[in-house]
Structures are given as structure tokens and as C-alpha cells.
Image (cartoon, rainbow, N blue to C red):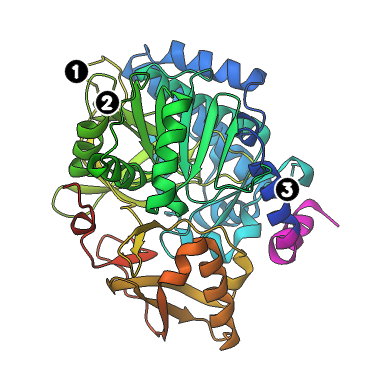
Amino acid sequence: MGTLEVIKKFIESNWIIEKAARELIERLPLKFRYGISYGPTFRHWLGFLKESEKWDRDRLARYQIEQLRDLLIHAGKNVPYYKTIFEEYGFKPERFQSLDDIKILPYLDRMTIHEKKEQFIAGNMPGRAFIPTYTSGTSGIPLVIYATKETEEKHWATIVDLWGRIGYTPKSKVVFFVANIRRGNRENLPWNKYSNTLVLSSNYFVNEWMDRYMEIIDTFKPEYLIGFPHTIAVFCSYMGKSKRKFILDSLKGVIVYAENVYEWQMEIIKEVLGVRVFSDYGMVEKVIHGGACEHSTTFHLYPQYGFTEYLHLHDAMCELVGTGFINYAMPLIRYKTGDLCAEIRGTCAECGRNYDTITRIEGRMGDFLITSDENIVSVYLDIDFSVFERIKRFQLYQDLPGKVALRIWPEDSFHIDDTQRILHEIKRSLGSNASKITFDIVLLDDVDVQPAGKFRMVEQQLNIRSFLKFL
């Protein structure tokens, strides 16, 4: 059985082994969860980023042309989907000479990857080298993206370089807020401590645990808090209205990632904690990575990480389209991210980097639900992806606290029993908060995609600000 057949079988039927492996990995310290990140590839890439951030625009463009040519040649030889596409479009990657040459190829969307996932896997790599990573499904179509240890080390080195703009190092004491953690400690608590890292579950944002978290953080004395912006904003809102005095003299900054951060969220965090809120922009698909400048809130996109195109839409807004350089196991070329940006510049006047600079990113807004007792619940699904095989999309729609419509767009092969499997997995992923939400199942025929092409897993009609008593 060839590599592609093995991977296809693994994707389609072996989710139990995949899930068990993921749970094992999630019990390890974070540095090991990123593929034992501090190996030679990590160190080389981190040094390269430091050196190349001084390059001018012409040298960066030459580097991107070289990286694109190598990636396209690899994809044309080893990736079934691109073998077909290149032949269909008469594209010869060996002749690639200009960044504009890539425009002959079609855009790639999430649905195509979902439907033809095994065709995107490089056939010249052994199956044992692949590391599965998972998108959160915030667009209604969760994906499995396969990478390698080298990919993960480059990705983590990019993050360390970015966070280093506000003083972070791998030795910094940090608190991570995550939706779900595997409870490996003896007391079976929703938090864990690994060396200089404290991990707290945001699925336990109720008064009892919020107070306990404050005590744990106070004792731990972290230098950085890291998590989704809406998660940290909710926690800070609770801290702000708490009668207990809470001062973190050790704190140097707050790092938020994975979704758009609103100005009012930053105001809450800064008012309560009194430190810089620093934004990280990236994705599991690993085609684009960027983040804030150390001197301002504008975003820089790493030209070493991937090639970014800007698909003009309306009202001076552009959709970000990415081709990643670091993942040869499952390369994605001209991938439409569904994320929007505005006001693109070629150089940052504050720091002098010749990276693409944008004033704001509008995409992946905070996905959350409101329980019947008006608590805010982060939605990050850690579930059996096989439940989505017979549906086109799903969506969680809410316009009343404690009540959610589970909208499902079925495939022709869909069976009514599939609704209960999907609902069971969603409830399990939400943990104890699921008991405070009533779900109504709604089957629909047509997919109503938002005008900009961004389909939300959570269609939230309630105003989160009204549930933050601190405001």
C-alpha cells in the first residue's frame, strides 16, 4: 500500500488512534507539543528571521521567487492535486520567474481541501513523518492539515520571533488560556502546570473557578498571559468587578491570537492589567503568519513564511490569499483564507521592516455562546471529525441566552442519526457548559455564505458587551 493510500485510510477511518495520539501530545509541555520545537531547524529558522528582517524589498522579493519556484516544482512532481492542475492550466513551475507568474493558477478554497484532502498530500514523504493539526472549524468546515517536524519547528520559531518583539523568550513564565486541556494531574483539575507554563481551561469560566484561577495566577507570577482575545477579555472583566485586589507586578504583556481583537477588548485588558496587548495573526493551514509591530498596533506579515496576495473585494477591503513556504507535506497554493484586511503598505515607518504592513485584520471574530445563566463560553471544537462526512456545513446560531439552533446542511447520503452524533460531539467539546444550553436542530438546503465569503461556525446575534458587567 502506497503512502497516499495509507494516509487516506488514516484520515477516513482511524480517528480513534488519531484522537488518542492528540490527547497524549496535549499532556506534554507546550514546547514538546510543537514537535520538540527547539531542535536545529528551530534555531536555524529563528536566526534566519533575525538576519533577514533587515533585507530590502528587492531582496525579499527574490527570496520569495526562489521559495515559490522550489515549492511549485515539488508540488508538481509529488502532490496529485497540483499535478492535475498544472497540466490543466499548462503551468510549468520550472519556468517560474516572477511573483506575477503564480496568477495563472486558480485560487484554492477550504471546501476543495475538504473534498479532496488525500490529493493534497505529498507522495514522496513517508507517512510516519506526518503530524496532523486541526483547524477549529470556525468557517463550518473543519480541516486536518498534515505537516512535518521541520514545519512545526519553523512555525514555532516564527512565533517566538514575533512574541520576542515584546520581550518573550522560551524561558518566560506564561499563562495559556485554552478551551480544553487534558487533565493529567492527580486531582483531575481543569488546569495544569508544566515547568514555566501554566495552562488554564476557559471552559470553566464560572465564579468559583475564576476566583481560583486568580489565586493560582497570583501565586505563579507570570510574565505573559496568552490566549484568545475574547477569553482574556472575559477573564479581565471578571477581575475588574471582583472585590479582591489583584495586582500582577510580574506581568510584562498580554499576547492574543487566532481571532480578530476588538478595540473594546483591548481597553478592558489594558485597564485591568495595565500592560501592552500584543496581537499574533496565524492559522493552522500555515500559509500566512504575522503580528503587531513592537512600536504600534499595525500588523506585519512575514515574507519568509509565505507569499501573500490581496484579493480586492469592496469598500477598500481585501481578502488575504496565502501560499505557505514551510509545509511541503501538504502544500497549499493560493489559499483563500476568508480573512479581510485594509490599508496595505510596503514598509513600516515605525520599525523600518520592509514587510507588508496592514492597519487591521477583520476575520475570525470571537466565536462564543451565551449559557442560560449568562456566562460566555468559548467555542473551540475538539471532536471526532468523521461526524462531518455526510454534511456540507454546520452552524451554531444564537439570538437568546441558553438557546442555540444547530443548523445543518446535509449531503445526499445524510441520515437523521447523524444529527445526534454531531450534537453529541459538540456537547462533549463544550464540557460542563453544554448542560446550560438548549439545542434545536434545523436542517437546511442552501448554504447562505456571507458577502465576503466568510462563513461563520457561530452566528452570534447577542451583544457580548452586554454580558460583561465590568463595562
Residue 276 — which label? Answer: 2
Residue 121 is left or right of residue 333, and the answer is right
Give the Cα separation between the discs numbered 2 and 1. 20 Å
Residue at x-position 27% and y-position 42%:
242
Please tell me which of labels 2 and 3 falls first in the chain. Answer: 3
Please tell me which of labels 2 and 1 falls first in the chain. Answer: 2
What residue sits right under mark 3 in the picture? 123
Determine whether 12 is above or below 133 in the image: below
| Magenta-drawn stretch contains 99 | no
Residue 447 is left or right of residue 463, and the answer is right
Q: Residues within 10 Å of mark 1 (few under 14, many from 20)?
A: few
Residue at x-position 19% and y-position 33%:
271
Residue 363 is left or right of residue 159, and the answer is left
Magenta stretch in the rendered image: 1-16
Q: Is residue 303 visible?
A: no
Q: Secondary structure at mark 1?
A: loop
Amino acid type, mark 3: Gly
What residue sits right under mark 1 in the picture? 349
Give the Cα separation between the discs numbered 1 and 3. 44 Å
Determine whether 289 is above or below 203 in the image: above
- CB atoms of marks 1 and 3 within 8 Å: no
**Quarter of the picture holding the N terminus:** bottom right
Amino acid type, mark 2: Arg
Q: Secondary structure at mark 3?
A: loop
Please tell me which of labels 1 and 3 falls first in the chain. Answer: 3
